[in-house]
Image: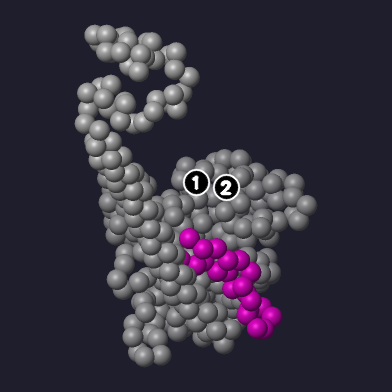
Amino acid sequence: MESLKSLKSLKSLKSLKSLKSLKSLKSLRSWGVIFKLFKLPENGVALIITLWVLLILSVMALESTHLMRIEIKRLTLSQEQNRLFHLAKAGTVKAVALIDEGREEALEDKESLLEDSNNNIIGRYRVKVVDEAGKLNINTATYEMLERLFENIPEMNAKSVAQAVINYRGSKESKSFDTTKEVLLVKGMTASIFYKEDTNDNNRLDPWEDDGERSLPDDNKDGKLDLGLKALITAFSQGKVNINSASAEVLQSLPMVTSEIARTIMEQRRSRPFASIEELKSFSGMSDEIFEKLSPFITVRSDTFRVDSTGRLNDSNMQKQILAIVDRSSPPAKIKYWREF
């Protein structure tokens, strides 16, 4: 008890330095000694320990609840993403089936409902089909054809970029572009030229792509989607351009095709599609020499299509899109390229 008497002589907490001589708390007989030392009630230790235990348990409970909420949100999001994937896939499967049957024109660009076995609406999907043969194939196009196409783009040096495409194509072991987007690696090509307003490459006019300068990308707010160069070129078609679906820019990139011939082709197909390329021989200004140079590059049938299928839930703004390139040149139709976003 002599050590306790010496402690009583301490006038302030500074005198607690003498406690350094104690090797451990084991030298104190009980917690009661500590509370007497600081003039605290002996029974306060139980209360303080209890409060600390409750505080620690509360923190652990809050942390556990927070982690559970995160896990529930993660599982919910995963389930929604899974549903969205199957909605988009349903649209893709339907498109492949109709393309295989030669009925791609039956695919209208509008939403369709998907129901379960009990006729409950699961969600919606929307399918858009684009004829890849209506574009210029950058793997088979000549320098002259590329130059003529690029002349329609003011921001581009047509001659140098056309030559850069030829050089890049020749530098690859496969001697060809694997995807259309690969053209972005060509010197002189930019994302702005390639995508224009459709920077997310979904082939649909989104709100931020039609609001002027309010948000990126910059657009002219005309209610129409400018698809840029990607709407004019492909790396997937069989090589020949379908005169029933090609744009005026693509038609005029072909050998010997003037703006007048391109306009006549587009006017003619509005009344009925061309059944044969031989029908062009009846056009004014279409000589045998012109037709002979043009015919190796054109067709009236398409075997390659781009399918954009978007799935959307009824109770959510979330959506998922599948982009597929479908080839029916040898039945059954096959998917050559697949991308989800």
Q: Amino acid at mark 2?
A: Leu
Q: Residue at position x 39%, y 82% from top?
A: 114
Could you give the CA–CA distance between mark 2 and mark 1, rounded to whole angstroms? Answer: 7 Å
Dots 2 and 1: beta carbons under 8 Å?
A: yes
Q: Estimate the x, y position of residue 219 in percent, counting from the top left.
A: 33, 49
Residue pushed farthest bottom? Answer: 118
Q: Nearer the viewer, residue 56 or 87?
A: 56
Identify the residue at image location x=78%, y=52%.
Answer: 173
Above/below status of 227 relative to 333: above
Q: Amino acid at mark 1?
A: Ala
Question: Which residues, given as a range, are shown in magenta?
Answer: 320-341
163 in magenta: no
Residue sitting at x 44%, y 13% = 21
Q: Position of residue 88 (x, y in %)?
A: 46, 72
**Residue 338 within the segment the image draws in magenta:** yes
Dot 2, crowdedness within 10 Å: few (<14), some or many (≥20)? some
Q: Residue at point 31% right, 67% down?
A: 316
Q: Which residue is mark 1?
A: 191
| Element carrying mark 2 | helix
Residue 184 shows which numbered tag?
2
The secondary structure that dominates the magenta segment is strand
Left or right of 221? Residue 299 is right
Mark positioned earlier in the residue sequence (2 or 1): 2
**Does residue 251 appear in this view?**
no
Q: Nearer the viewer, residue 40 or 293?
A: 40
Q: Vertically, is 163 above or below 15?
A: below
Relative to residue 27, is residue 120 depicted above or below? below
The residue at the far right in this view is 173
